[in-house]
């Protein structure tokens, strides 16, 4: 069975207060589109276009080097996680369930702890690992704590953000923002923190049914283009 992942999703309003770099996003109404800005032509973007996620090596939660090239041929859902966020329970629970369901079909979830949003990931790597693996039975890879914004941004997140800028620019907005990477290591999706993993799964299944059964949708040209694009770019084997 082959699954294809969609690139549009409707998002409701968030009641959380997001504070970052001195500004607040309160009761923010996320748009019903992917968090992506038009790509700017030029030398700087060309260097990003030539890279893939597989060019990077990161450290796992135990301090071991992990070349991301080991995930070639797999779809990746990359998430900046935190242990003390209002989004923690729902996201860890749903990520674990989705991983259990699709890990044998070519999906990997890569979790990167980050303490930049409300200091909601204050623990050591060993504490983070114990929390995720004991409380939520997380089996997907968890990596070393990183910065996702600012001067010390991890190189892998520099790549992710440069490949798919958000509607407020390249900044990651809060815990549990999600990047979807295709089997060739290219970013094809970016979802805001309030997009639940189960919402993403719904579009995985809808895309699969639409393409496999040859159904014609009348939900608008954007949705139709999304189905066509995803059918070509990303598959879970």
Image (cartoon, grey):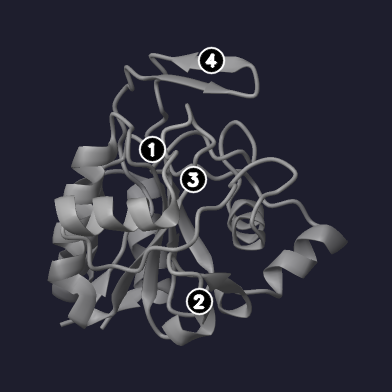
Q: Position of residue 170 (x, y in %)?
A: 64, 42
Corner quadrant of residue 103: bottom left
Q: Is residue 216 visible?
A: no
Residue hosting label 4: 24
Residue hosting label 1: 193
Where is the C terminus found, in terms of image quarters? bottom left
Q: Image height check: is 30 above or below 141?
A: above
Disc nearest the viewer among 4 and 2? 2
Q: Residue at x 34, y 51 (%)?
A: 127
Disc nearest the viewer among 2 and 1? 2
Corner quadrant of residue 3: bottom left
CB contact under 8 Å: marks 3 and 4: no
Q: Residue at x 64, y 47 (%)?
A: 38
Query: Quick one: label 2 or label 3, which is nearer the N terminus?
Result: 2
In this image, 175 relative to 162: left or right? Answer: left
Q: Label 4's element?
A: strand
Nearer to us in this view, 178 or 68: 68
Q: Label 3's element?
A: loop
Marks 3 and 4, how far apart at CA: 19 Å
Nearer to us in this view, 159 or 110: 110
Query: Quick one: label 4 or label 2, which is nearer the N terminus?
Result: 4
């Amino acid at each position: 069975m082959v699954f294809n992942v969609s690139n549009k999703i409707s998002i409701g309003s968030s009641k959380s207060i997001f504070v970052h770099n001195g500004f607040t996003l309160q009761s923010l109404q996320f748009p019903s589109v992917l968090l992506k800005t038009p790509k700017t032509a030029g030398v700087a973007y060309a260097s990003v276009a030539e890279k893939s996620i597989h060019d990077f090596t990161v450290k796992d939660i135990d301090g071991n080097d992990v070349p991301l090239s080991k995930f070639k041929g797999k779809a990746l859902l990359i998430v900046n996680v935190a242990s003390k966020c209002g989004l923690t329970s729902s996201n860890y629970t749903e990520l674990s369930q989705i991983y259990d369901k699709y890990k044998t079909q070519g999906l990997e979830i890569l979790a990167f702890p980050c303490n930049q949003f409300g200091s909601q990931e204050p623990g050591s790597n060993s504490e983070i690992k114990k929390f995720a693996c004991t409380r939520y039975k997380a089996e997907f890879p968890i990596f070393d704590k990183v910065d996702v914004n600012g001067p010390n941004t991890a190189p892998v997140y520099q790549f992710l953000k440069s490949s798919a800028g958000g509607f407020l620019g390249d900044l990651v907005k809060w815990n549990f923002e999600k990047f979807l990477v295709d089997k060739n290591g290219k970013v094809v999706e970016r979802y805001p923190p309030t997009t639940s993993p189960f919402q993403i799964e719904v579009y995985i299944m809808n895309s699969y049914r639409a393409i496999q059964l040859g159904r014609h949708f009348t939900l608008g040209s954007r949705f139709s283009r999304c189905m066509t694009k995803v059918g070509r770019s990303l598959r879970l084997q």
